[in-house]
Image (cartoon, rainbow, N blue to C red):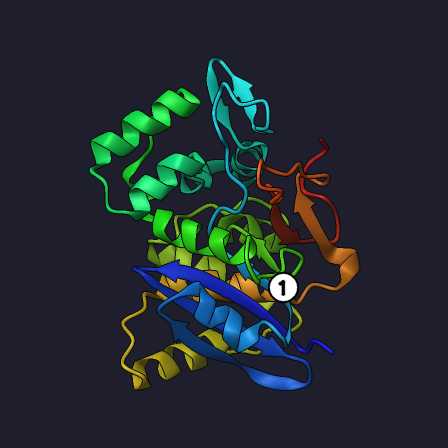
Amino acid sequence: MCTQYVGVDWSSGEWVSIAYTDGSDPPSVEVFEEITGVWDHYGTSACRIVVDVPIGLCESLESDACSCVEEDGELSRHCDALARKVIGSQYRSVFTAPAREASKLAAAGADHSEIGDTNEELTGKRLTQQAAGISEGIVEVENLLLGDGDREVLIEGHPEVCFRALKGTPLEHSKHTASGVAERLAVLRDVPEYTQGDWRTVAQELGREGHRVGLDDVLDACALALTACAPNREFHRLPSDPQTDAKGLPMQMVYRSENQLISE
């Protein structure tokens, strides 16, 4: 029987994992070098593991097996477009996910110009440095899910979508500002599973272990973990009926809300 609900944030080449456990308070925190470490630790005990990297990728404009959306000669995931729409002024935080071959090039350490050229050839659009920077994590997660990982347990979430859904209205401030931190802490405090100061408990534990993890990454992982805690009636997918990519992986972002964020 599963008992844990986990949020995982990809932070500077490490996986920061926060877990809430049935009947247990406060949350626990672990840091892993590889996503396989997360799966080995939580795979048999977690009901949901919500991770902040794209799962399900575009192939190319020419591929018949690609379920991505083509608009104005550019190919992209439908969930990315919907996410930008629902989070309002923070829309720039949703990076366009790389095409599968471009992500593999980036993960292998290719030059950014080569990565950009490849992604443009495949999708009609170049790739940002930020999107290329998370490709190592994207490839790790994909390899896990195409192997021993369970795609019903390990699922994609975006922290800004999660915060937006938990708050009920779009956030006003960037997470990199003091006002943005205060805004997100206020959102977390209203979630039933969250206990006052959980973020501080997590931060102190990370400090004792010598990990240099940013406060924004801690808050992101908290939002993902609390999303994983959602009762079934509050657990939604964006889009509500996601398509799968050429490898059979769902292209979606999950969130927690009493109502769907958008009419599709």
Q: Count neighbours of disc 1 (C-alpha within 10 A) and say few if under 14, some if 14 to 19, many if 20 or more.
A: many
Q: Which residue is mark 1?
A: 228
Percent x, y of residue 161: 55, 48
| Quadrant of the snapshot with the C terminus | top right
Percent x, y of residue 185: 48, 65
Taking the spot 67% from the left edge, 57% from the top edge, the residue there is: 152
Q: Is residue 260 left or right of residue 244?
A: right
Percent x, y of residue 83: 55, 39
Q: Is residue 252 left or right of residue 1?
A: left
Q: Is residue 185 visible?
A: no
Taking the spot 49% from the left edge, 46% from the top edge, the residue there is: 54
Q: Is residue 124 left or right of residue 86?
A: left
Taking the spot 33% from the left edge, 54% from the top edge, the residue there is: 177
Percent x, y of residue 146: 55, 53
**Picture quadrant of residue 229:** bottom right
Mark 1 lies on a secondary structure that is helix
| Quadrant of the snapshot with the N terminus | bottom right
Residue 254 vertical position relative to residue 12 in the rendered view, above or below: above
Q: Is residue 43 left or right of residue 206?
A: right
For the residue pair 166 and 217, the one nearer the viewer reads as 217
Q: Amino acid at mark 1?
A: Ala
Taking the spot 53% from the left edge, 47% from the top edge, the residue there is: 55
